[in-house]
Image (cartoon, rainbow, N blue to C red):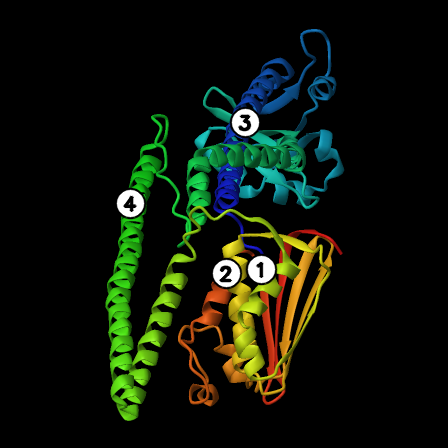
């Protein structure tokens, strides 16, 4: 599963926070709206209750009478105009009038759902109205206002005015609309805004990370250019990065200088020692001392081998510098043929048959020094570890502007363990250490060249059957 980028994570977090803010704001607005409407409904019921008492009721001794309104309208008409329901009780909790929704209810339902004994008693004794939301069995909510019917100090009964509440339904509908329409749009908009803002904020960091990815042992980029409009955190990070680059560059320069100086200082006394031994050998030849001559030849050979090791180390250490090395067109056939001619003496000593299968006009684009070193090391091993009267087959093929070179020998081969360790520096299998000389650096150099040149290197080998090395990915091919 692909991991989310930091920019995407922060954008998602931003959208979630924005959504929570929007939801919280909606809830607060809904609460404010609910409180406002509740106050309006309470004021409305209070006003209508006072109008009903004033315009449609008469208190006469112990009796409560109804009368017509100022314009001759009945109480029923007035309640219908206001969409109100009313129930009236006398001072003995006997129901003496029902209007609106109360007409459809039984006495029990009225007394248990709307005006229960406790509510009646509270209003009668305190002579104070009570505002209350009542939910009936049908889940319908009513806003009710229960008021005492008082004349002077005498209470004639209790009246409850009710109006069907639609506030909850309105709020639910509004919130659903918010969730179904506004919320997805707000989430998308907040995510886009958050992603854009975060991406813009992190763009210097992304550039810095991309710049860091270009660093390796062969490429130390220049210092990052600092600008005045960068955030201080990015500026500080860039300065730290530049300081790290300076330290790395200084270390590499010192390493290269040490390798060059060490190689020079070691090769000079080696050359002098070999020259001195050659003079000594000539003097011994004059005096006819074959035993001493053999010993001197052995020392000379060891010194020459040491010189080859130093050359290989220097080659391996400096090959990745790539200074002044420009890829050019290389004729494959003639270049390999030249390398084989330089190995003619070793090939003839073992009577090895070499076949080069390549067209004359096959060319590739590569650094010439790299290609010659690559082929020399592979062919040198193919000759060195081959058997007498063995064979070496070289096949050069091209396909879709890519070339592949396959070198197969009939040498002693290797087991799987040796194949896995073949490209390690100074590695030489136990079987070949006593049979041939070498530094164990040739294939390490081959691997380094393939890495620098974006080539694919593969090796297959079987014990006592030979080795096949395949190098593919040579670019800019011309010829078939």
User: What secondary structure is found at the residue carrying circle 1?
Assistant: loop
Q: Earlier in the sequence, mark 2 or mark 3?
A: 3
Label 2 Cα neighbours within 10 Å, binned few <14 / some 14-19 / many ≥20? many
Q: Which secondary structure, mark 3?
A: helix
Residue 290 at what x, y percent from top left?
30, 91
Determine which quarter of the picture holds residue 227: top left
- Say whether disc 1 or disc 2 marks the residue closer to the N-terminus: 2
Q: Which mark is residue 33?
A: 3
**Residue 383 lies in what quarter of the image?**
bottom right
> Which labelled disc corresponds to residue 246?
4
Q: Position of residue 293 (x, y in %)?
A: 29, 87
Q: Which residue is mark 1?
A: 455
What is the quadrant of the N terminus in the image? Answer: bottom right
Q: Which mark is in front, 2 or 4?
A: 2
Q: Residues within 10 Å of mark 4 (few under 14, many from 20)?
A: some
Q: Are marks 1 and 2 in contact (CB under 8 Å)?
A: yes
Camera-side residue: 220 or 39? 220
**Labels 3 and 4: the sequence-earlier one:** 3
What secondary structure is marked by label 2? helix
């Amino acid at each position: 599963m692909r991991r989310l980028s930091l920019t995407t994570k922060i954008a998602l977090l931003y959208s979630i926070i924005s959504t929570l803010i929007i939801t919280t704001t909606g809830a607060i607005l809904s609460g404010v709206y609910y409180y406002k409407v509740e106050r309006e409904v309470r004021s409305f019921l209070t006003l209508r209750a006072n109008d009903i008492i004033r315009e449609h009721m008469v208190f006469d001794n112990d009796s409560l009478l109804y009368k017509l309104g100022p314009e001759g309208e009945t109480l029923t008409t007035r309640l219908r105009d206001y969409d109100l329901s009313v129930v009236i009780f006398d001072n003995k909790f006997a129901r003496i009038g029902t209007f609106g929704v109360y007409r459809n209810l039984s006495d029990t339902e009225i007394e248990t759902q709307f005006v229960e004994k406790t509510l009646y008693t509270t209003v009668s004794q305190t002579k104070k109205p009570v505002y209350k939301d009542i939910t009936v069995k049908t889940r319908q909510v009513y806003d009710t206002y229960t008021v005492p019917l008082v004349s002077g100090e005498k209470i004639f009964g209790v009246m409850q005015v009710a109006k069907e509440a639609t506030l909850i339904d309105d709020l639910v509908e509004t919130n659903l609309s918010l969730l179904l329409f506004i919320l997805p749009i707000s989430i998308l908009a907040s995510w886009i805004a958050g992603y854009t803002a975060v991406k813009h904020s992190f763009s210097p960091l992304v550039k810095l990370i991309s710049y860091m990815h270009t660093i390796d042992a062969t490429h130390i980029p220049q210092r990052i250019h600092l600008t005045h409009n960068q955030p201080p955190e990015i500026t500080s990070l860039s300065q730290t990065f530049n300081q790290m680059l300076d330290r790395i560059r200084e270390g590499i320069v010192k390493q290269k200088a040490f390798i060059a100086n060490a190689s020079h200082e070691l090769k000079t006394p080696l050359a002098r020692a070999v020259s001195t031994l050659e003079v000594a050998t000539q003097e011994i030849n004059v005096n006819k001392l074959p035993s001493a001559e053999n010993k001197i030849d052995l020392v000379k050979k060891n010194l020459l081998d040491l010189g080859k090791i130093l050359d290989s180390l220097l080659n391996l250490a400096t090959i990745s510098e790539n200074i002044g090395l420009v890829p050019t067109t290389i004729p494959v056939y003639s270049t390999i043929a030249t390398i084989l001619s330089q190995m003619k003496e070793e090939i003839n000593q073992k009577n090895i048959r070499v076949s080069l299968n390549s067209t004359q006009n096959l060319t590739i684009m590569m650094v010439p020094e790299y290609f010659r070193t690559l082929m020399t090391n592979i062919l040198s091993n193919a000759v060195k570890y081959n058997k007498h009267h063995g064979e070496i087959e070289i096949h050069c093929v091209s396909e879709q502007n890519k070339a592949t070179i396959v070198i197969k020998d009939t040498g002693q081969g290797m087991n799987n363990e040796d194949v896995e360790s073949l490209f390690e520096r100074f590695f030489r299998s136990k079987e070949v250490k006593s049979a041939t000389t070498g530094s164990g650096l040739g294939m390490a150099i081959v691997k380094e060249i393939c890495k620098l040149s974006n080539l694919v290197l593969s090796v297959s080998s079987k014990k006592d059957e030979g080795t096949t090395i395949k190098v593919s990915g040579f670019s800019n091919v011309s010829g078939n």
